[in-house]
Image (cartoon, rainbow, N blue to C red):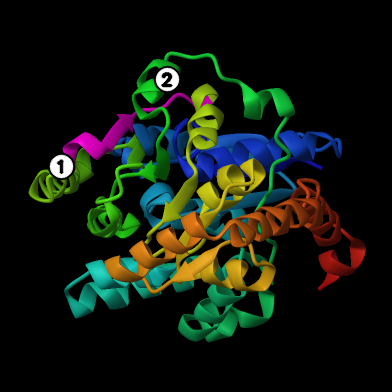
């Protein structure tokens, strides 16, 4: 069986790219060695077209299964051409949807463009044999927008990597010097990409409400894309407006090898998102490190938190609710211990072999004689 995976594979900071890499590592344990093809419109039109041509010229090799890791901003418009040619040759297609259409529809102002976007996604999804999402909420949304594909939508939950002890404890890096400035403080943290949908401005406002506590500090870590520099400037201005510069530490472009140390430093981690489908940061980083977390009730976050008791859920866009939840976690030792215990149980339940095993079984099922004749 020759398996292809097409998606954003080369961006070391991209959540989907990390998802693909971890998925491939585990598939290798099942003696599945997929070929990966990078396709990412964010890399620029010329690179995108070159990568698309590379895929198109490789179709003659006739893979058994092609698995698309889809977001609109990565696979872009040329994926429809690739999919058309793949289906013409009768190949099996799987698509994993990493983002909901709603976020894009809110940003598209012109009604005609919204209809074109939905038509584009419907056409792409319709051509796939299996559609995969990570949460029940996302499945319901896909069924709402694209009713005709509802019968082929499957839920395969997000990976929960098993962190090695040395990886979690590792405490020697250049990052340590910066974190020394926060020594003896209770650290409220955020880790991820700085963009409006992440609600970092809400977190800053919430922290300003509780910054009277001399023992607290806010640590914001992650990266800022060129397209989000304006939002980053707004965050800096908010910090100045509330006069909390001495209580806020910002660390950008954290290397992968320093992420564990960074997260271990945080006493409470926040995901104040205004919108999301599911969060790789929650499942890939926070839960394996067993950290109390406050998260917005958006996408799959609230769904997972309520089902498994792995965090505190608050209304999105509400600084006061976020501030109250942070204070409650700081004051309530029993609640923190309960969340950490539930996260440990969740890791055991959703061990890393589950997702790759689900994919491995799915691949074999698609290639079975029964599936081939259907």
**Spatial CA span between label 1 and label 2:** 21 Å
Residue 92 in sight: no
Question: Residue at the location (30% across, 55% down)?
Answer: 203
Note whether 316 is above or below 140 in the view shown: above
Q: Nearer the viewer, residue 81 or 260?
A: 260
Q: Residue 240 appears in which quarter of the rendering?
A: top left
Residue 221 is left or right of residue 132, and the answer is left
| 8 over 200 or under it: above or below | above
**Residue that appears at 49% across and 69% down:** 313
Q: Residue 205, image x and y in percent? A: 23, 58
What element does badge 1 sit on? helix
Q: Residues within 10 Å of mark 2 (few under 14, many from 20)?
A: some
Magenta-drawn stretch contains 86? no
Q: Is residue 250 magenta?
A: yes
Percent across and percent down for residue 279 are 51, 55
Q: Which mark is on residue 236? A: 1
- Count up the numbered dots: 2
Residue 345 in view of the camera? yes
Q: Which residue is mark 2?
A: 175
Which disc number belongs to residue 108? none
Tell me where residue 99 appears, x and y as whole percent. Answer: 46, 61
Q: Is residue 74 above or below residue 338?
A: above
Crowding near the residue tagged with mark 1, few <14, some 14–19, many ≥20 C-alpha atoms within 10 Å:
some
Residue at 38% in and 59% down: 272
Q: Which residues are magenta?
A: 244-256
In front of the other: 348 or 21: 348
């Amino acid at each position: 069986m020759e398996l292809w995976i097409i998606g954003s594979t080369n961006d070391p900071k991209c959540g989907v790219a990390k998802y693909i890499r971890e998925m491939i590592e585990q598939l290798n344990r099942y003696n599945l060695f997929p070929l990966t093809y990078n396709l990412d419109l964010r890399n620029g039109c010329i690179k995108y077209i070159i990568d698309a041509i590379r895929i198109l010229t490789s179709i003659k090799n006739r893979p058994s299964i092609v698995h698309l890791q889809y977001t609109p901003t990565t696979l872009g418009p040329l994926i429809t051409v690739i999919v058309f040619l793949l289906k013409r040759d009768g190949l099996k297609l799987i698509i994993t949807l990493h983002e909901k259409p709603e976020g894009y529809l809110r940003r598209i102002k012109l009604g005609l463009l919204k209809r074109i976007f939905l038509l584009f996604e419907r056409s792409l999804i319709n051509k796939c044999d299996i559609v995969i999402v990570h949460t029940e909420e996302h499945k319901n949304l896909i069924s709402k927008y694209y009713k005709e594909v509802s019968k082929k939508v499957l839920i395969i939950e997000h990976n929960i990597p098993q962190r090695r002890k040395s990886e979690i404890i590792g405490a020697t890096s250049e990052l340590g010097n910066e974190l020394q400035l926060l020594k003896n403080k209770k650290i409220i943290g955020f880790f991820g990409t700085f963009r409006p949908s992440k609600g970092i401005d809400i977190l800053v406002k919430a922290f300003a409400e509780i910054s009277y506590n001399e023992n607290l500090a806010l640590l914001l870590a992650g990266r800022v894309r060129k397209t989000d520099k304006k939002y980053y400037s707004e965050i800096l201005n908010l910090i100045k407006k509330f006069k909390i510069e001495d209580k806020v530490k910002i660390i950008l472009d954290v290397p992968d090898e320093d992420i564990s140390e960074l997260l271990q430093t945080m006493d409470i981690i926040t995901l104040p998102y205004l919108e999301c489908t599911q969060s790789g940061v929650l499942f890939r980083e926070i839960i394996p490190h067993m950290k109390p977390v406050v998260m917005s009730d958006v996408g799959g976050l609230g769904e997972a938190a309520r089902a498994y008791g792995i965090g505190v859920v608050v209304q999105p866009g509400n600084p006061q609710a976020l501030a109250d939840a942070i204070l409650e976690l700081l004051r309530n030792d029993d609640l923190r211990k309960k969340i950490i215990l539930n996260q440990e149980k969740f890791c055991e339940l959703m061990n890393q072999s589950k997702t790759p095993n689900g994919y491995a079984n799915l691949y074999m099922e698609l290639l079975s004689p029964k599936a081939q004749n259907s």
